[in-house]
Amino acid sequence: MNVTTTPSGKKLITVIPGDGVGPECVQSALRLIEATGAPVEWEVREAGASVFKKGLESGVPPETIESIRKTRVVLKGPLETPVGYGEKSANVTLRKLFETYGNIRPVREMPGVPTPYSGRGIDLVVVRENVEDLYAGIEHMQTPGVAQCLKLISRKGCEKIVRLAFEVARAEGRKKVHCATKSNIMKLTEGMLKRTFEEIAPEYPDIEANHIIVDNCAHQLVKRPEQFEVIVTTNMNGDILSDLTSALIGGLGFAPSANIGNEVAIFEAVHGSAPKYAGKNVINPTAVILSAVMMLRYIGEFEAASLIENAVVVTLEEGKARTRDVVGDELAATTTAYTDEIIRNLGRKSERWQVREPKPLQLPQVTRDPVMVRPQARRVVGMDVFVEFDGTPEQLGKSLEQLAEGSPLKLKMVSSRGTMVYPAAGFLTDLVDHWRCRFILRDGGGDLTDAQAFDLLQRISSKHRWTHIEKLHEFDGQPGFTKAQGED
């Protein structure tokens, strides 16, 4: 990994205190790191609410970006996107700007933190793809009443996150990786992660590889979470599953994370800024502290990381200082008192709870070539035209058939929200004004040209409002598109 050192030999880290309770949590983590004597130096920068209010819509100022480019390692508090300021999440902006493609979220039962799962030995890691999927944020209003969000899954993104998951397993001495997808429904997008996982798994013969449907994964996490060691999944699935897993061990106050890229790594708690508790010295800083432990291991400071993690475990186990989310307001220690107790416990170890001592994480090296899949043969066999129309499927279908007469393309079917409604098949489908109209080449062969596609669009636009098109690709003889429900 890339770490910048100062002239005095210390490792330079960008620190973003964040919003709400962020500064208090980050300060606890910095105090602990400094108490270990680890050779680190901080470069404090801002992002989030204060930046949005200055009129910068990204929430991340140029001086913060420049600092991260220089240090390549970030410890940050939670960032807020205030209502009425800014358009994008500053958190997502940071992940995308620096291609931190993998979100690593360890989840482990902690002593002294009672939950319905106490004693079950929960100890797993969720490895979540972090920059694509629905979080690409590409949305359009297709009609005044129908919205679309593009779910973008790339082979490159899948390969990077799958390899990262196996490398996390190896680094931590784990023996099992589950890949959680919804590939039974989304066979091309979610299916790409499944196929990539199955292709790469044989390269890691020391690790058991299993695929699981994501809804069953959620079910099994609640029913028998101790069966899992590493779960790799897509961005949206990972967002949901990782919050679920944190609830199993006491909540977001104990949920650290690392956003890992090949050039930059950002370490942060999973929880939000909790503005109503800001400045009250009552928040649980454990998630940020454990995120800092992950950061220390990333930069090679393994001894300091173990000192802090062991001290946190001893503190929780003894229960002399516990925060409000564990014991309630009346018995709770303040944020600073809890941190003081952890500092006093530096150098101590629990006799019952063993801290994992991972090896250095080997980051996957994936080609920077934007093209990872090169088919031997390809052709365009038709096109889907999405049309706004307020009549019946029969009216639209017959009109489109007439408009396509004399064209190389013929109408195959019309669907509404994924279900074929023309030709009529007797389905009891509720309709909206958004229709996918599938046209295919009449002779079944050849390759659709742009001129032929434009000609059909002109014909359609003479009577109907179309909103966008999708070419129907065939790669190496296999369709690069799915069928509607009910379509032959």
Image (cartoon, grey):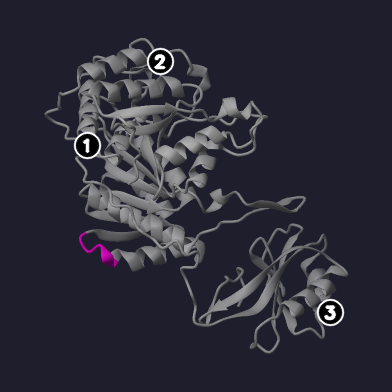
Q: Main secondary structure of the magenta part?
A: loop
The 10 Å Cα crowd at callout 2, few under 14, some 14 to 19, many 20 or more, is: many
Q: 375 or 475, which lies in front? A: 375
Query: Is residue 23 rendered to the left or right of residue 487?
Result: left
Q: Amino acid at mark 1?
A: Phe
- Badge 2 amino acid: Val
**Stretch of the chain drawn in magenta:** 202-206
Label of residue 302 in the image: 1
Q: Nearer the viewer, mark 3 or mark 2?
A: 2
Residue at which label 2 appears: 282
Relative vertical location of residue 14 with respect to residue 3 in this rendering, above or below: above
Q: Residues within 10 Å of mark 1 (few under 14, many from 20)?
A: some
Residue pointed to by mark 3:
402
Most extreme residue toward the right is 462
> In the rendered image, which quarter is residue 285 located in?
top left
Residue beneath the point at 49% across and 66% down: 187
- Asked if residue 289 lies left or right of residue 425, the reply is left
- Distance CA(mark 3)–CA(mark 1): 72 Å
Amino acid type of the residue that numbered disc 3 sits on in the rendered structure? Gln
